[in-house]
Image: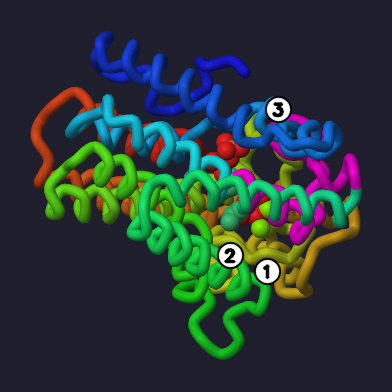
Amino acid sequence: MTRSGIPGLEAPDPTLEAELRSRLDEVEEALQKAVRADFDFLTEAASHLIAAGGKRFRPMLALLAAQLGDPGAPEVVRAAVVCELTHLATLYHDDVMDEAPVRRGAQSANARWGNSIAILVGDFLFARAADIVAELGPEAVRIQARTFARLVHGQIAETVGPRDIDPVGHYLHVVAEKTGSLIATSARFGAMFGGLAGREVDALARYGETMGVAFQLSDDLLDIASDSEQSGKTPGTDLREGVPTLPVLYALAGDESDAASVRLREILSAGPVTEDTVHAEALGLLRESAALKRARETVRAYAEQARMELAPLPEVPARRALESLCDFIADRTN
Ligand code: IPE
Ligand code: IPE
Ligand code: MG
Ligand code: MG
């Protein structure tokens, strides 16, 4: 995997950057070791998405948070590995649920080996994460278990839909649970095992949660606004699967009477957009819509809120790197 694409790595301080690179190498080595199984096929299937790429955003956040305390504590790398393994497991399962053919620029596990294997490999990765988190003690085990439960709640709430509550409020809640939860825990673990004070640990967890919401919302925007070259995924997957992300919800809630807005609402209100020409039309209309601009503003607002959560932390290079992640999230969809 190339390292240049990792957000946060190009830290605003060369010493910090060198330190992060070396710690990320340790994470990488530990990840590869963690997915080794007695059965070669399982090792291959579990290594598949690790080898394919990925931003290592969660490990990076754990490492950066620890930089505000004692970054050399051996638990920090283990905690970072637990977060990435948990994330990886959810990706294997999520691609089954979303019937996604491409992940990290490679064939998804479900496309390559079928749903059963993808589900079982996801389970294997959760088991490996559990094994490593056990070395970090009962509090870490409890945090990881509760994080995972929140994440599953989010995926279920997304699947069930808003029923009779406000769809935008429901979606923001889904996003906090399915994505904010693990990103919050990544920052919390880094801070905890880096030995930070309780108040700082909590501030970093709140930063992670809010950043996680911004991150997921910006990912949803990329699903509409980018090509697969940029995202490593198939554009328009949410639309095809009928996952009503923020731009879609804003478009549906709009009352503009121009022909494009009316046509967009007509397509979106009919449910999943599966027919190829209609799908291309809807993507084109969404890309030009006021709803997409509004969703970008929402991402920016969450990224700014995340930045404010850093206020109790000392003004050191790691804090500046965490702040620059806010800019990365806010800008990556433009
Ligand atoms: C993808 O997460 C799923 C979301 C929560 C948006 P990432 O965008 O961190 O995926 P990788 O790890 O870089 O592949
Ligand atoms: C990913 O959700 C969140 C989790 C894996 C928990 P999405 O379905 O929105 O993310 P992508 O677009 O497939 O990465
Ligand atoms: Mg998905
Ligand atoms: Mg999904």
Residue labelled with disc 1 = 265
Q: Secondary structure at mark 3?
A: helix
Q: Position of residue 212 (x, y in %)?
A: 42, 51
57 versus 243 height, above or below: above
Q: Compute the Cα span from label 2 to label 1.
A: 7 Å
Residue labelled with disc 3 = 52
Q: Is residue 133 left or right of residue 156?
A: left
Q: Secondary structure at mark 1?
A: helix
Query: Closer to the N terminus: mark 2 or mark 3?
Result: 3
What residue is shown at x 59% (from left), y 61% (from top)? Answer: 245
Q: Is residue 140 left or right of residue 182?
A: left
The stretch of residues the image draws in magenta is 88-113
- Amino acid type, residue under disc 3 in the picture: Ala
Query: Closer to the N terminus: mark 1 or mark 3?
Result: 3
Q: Quadrant of ligand 1?
A: top right
- Residue 106 lies in the magenta stretch: yes
What residue is shown at x 84% (from left), y 32% (from top)? Answer: 40
- Amino acid type, residue under disc 2 in the picture: Ala
